[in-house]
Amino acid sequence: MTIGVTGATGQLGRLVIGKLKAKAPAENIVALVRTPAKAADLGVQVREADYNKPGTLEQALPGIERLLLISSSEVGRRIAQHGNVIDAAKKAGVKHMAYTSLLHADTSALTRLAEEHGPTEAKLKASGILFTILRNGWYTENYLGFVPAAAASGALLGCAGEGKIASAPRADYAEAAVVVLTTPGHENKTYELAGDQAYTLGELAAEISRQTGKTVVYKNLPESDYAAALAGFGLPAAVAQLIANSNTKAGQGALFDGGRQLSKLIGRPTTPLSAVVAEALKA
Ligand SMILES: NC(=O)c1ccc[n+]([C@@H]2O[C@H](COP(=O)([O-])OP(=O)(O)OC[C@H]3O[C@@H](n4cnc5c(N)ncnc54)[C@H](OP(=O)(O)O)[C@@H]3O)[C@@H](O)[C@H]2O)c1
């Protein structure tokens, strides 16, 4: 059985390829990437597959039986991009396709993100291809970049109030994708994937304090001030606004899920916040 992974040179994609290699022969794994030169170190077959170039997708997908479509990072262009992949997969006779969506994509308050994932899910379901929707929650890593700065300054910034965040590191979501690609029983299912342990940003600050021995407090800012702070860290203004808005929605519960479907799928508890913070402080 040949398994293809799009976006294989991305952070999640690299983890998926690494974990797939432990489960399937490398010659049966195809990294589908927009820049093949970046994939030389993956140690599997590499084919060019650019979401914006349907011709590359039509050439790359024949022979692939199971396909993981990792959602594009080009926010705003994704409905058409993902649609191109689904059309090409249908043409190529892909039997089973998994897609990395967003937690609670059908009801999520993260409207700017959900408005692209919803139509992709609908198109995949209507395609006739066996599907698995992996509705991934937030990556714990989304907060890690700020851990050293928080430890140094004594303040962790955010605008999520008391919102509980059930995140998990990319590696846990990658493992879930590999389970779906390599074991039976996931056809036509939608999984809500989130970390077992939910925390507030205040609790994240407390964890940084505990591990560093320095006092770190959580400072809850108005959304616009937090966006400005993120821009001050060098993020492009549009990205800073999207993250700040997602944080506000997290304060209203948008990043919480208590169903524990991720740990059930991977057969172990999700990686705890303390382990991810320890990793960030080591870096
Ligand atoms: N759950 C969360 O917290 C969270 C956070 C951020 C993003 N996401 C979503 O999850 C996805 C995977 O996360 P990640 O951390 O692996 O993101 P990432 O490191 O930015 O990887 C994104 C991947 O998408 C590929 N890509 C972008 N445009 C493409 C195109 N036109 N054709 C083909 N491939 C294209 C990139 O290719 P290159 O390697 O060539 O750049 C890269 O491999 C993201 O793309 C985004 O949709 C989720």
Image (cartoon, grey):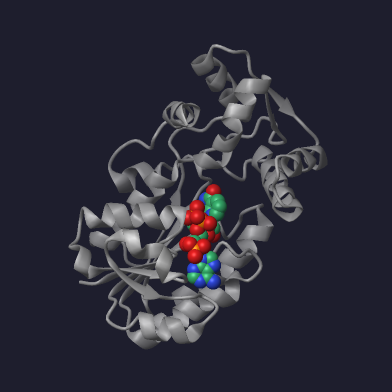
Query: Foreground: 146 or 66?
Result: 146
Q: Residue furthest left?
A: 25
Compared with 59, 146 (above or below) is above
Compared with 50, 243 (above or below) is above
Say whether residue 37 is left or right of residue 202: left
Q: Residue placed at 27% from the left, 81% from the top? A: 63
Does residue 103 show up?
no
Q: Residue 232 at what x, y percent from top left?
A: 76, 40
Q: Residue 92 at what x, y percent from top left?
A: 35, 85
Q: Residue placed at 39% from the left, 35% from the top? A: 271
Say whether residue 85 is left or right of residue 107: left
Q: Residue placed at 63% from the left, 59% from the top? A: 113
Query: Foreground: 8 or 42?
Result: 42
Please state the total of marks drawn on the protein image. Answer: 0
The answer to which image quadrant residue 96 occupies is bottom left
Q: Residue placed at 51% from the left, 44% from the top? A: 139
The answer to which image quadrant residue 269 occupies is top left
The answer to which image quadrant residue 70 occupies is bottom left
Query: Foreground: 90 or 74?
Result: 74
Compared with 135, 208 (above or below) is above
Q: Residue 225 at what x, y percent from top left?
A: 81, 38
Where does the N terminus fall, quadrant-wise? Answer: bottom left
Q: Residue 66 at what x, y percent from top left?
A: 30, 71
Compared with 239, 250 (above or below) is above
Does residue 213 show up?
yes
Say whether residue 230 is left or right of residue 129: right
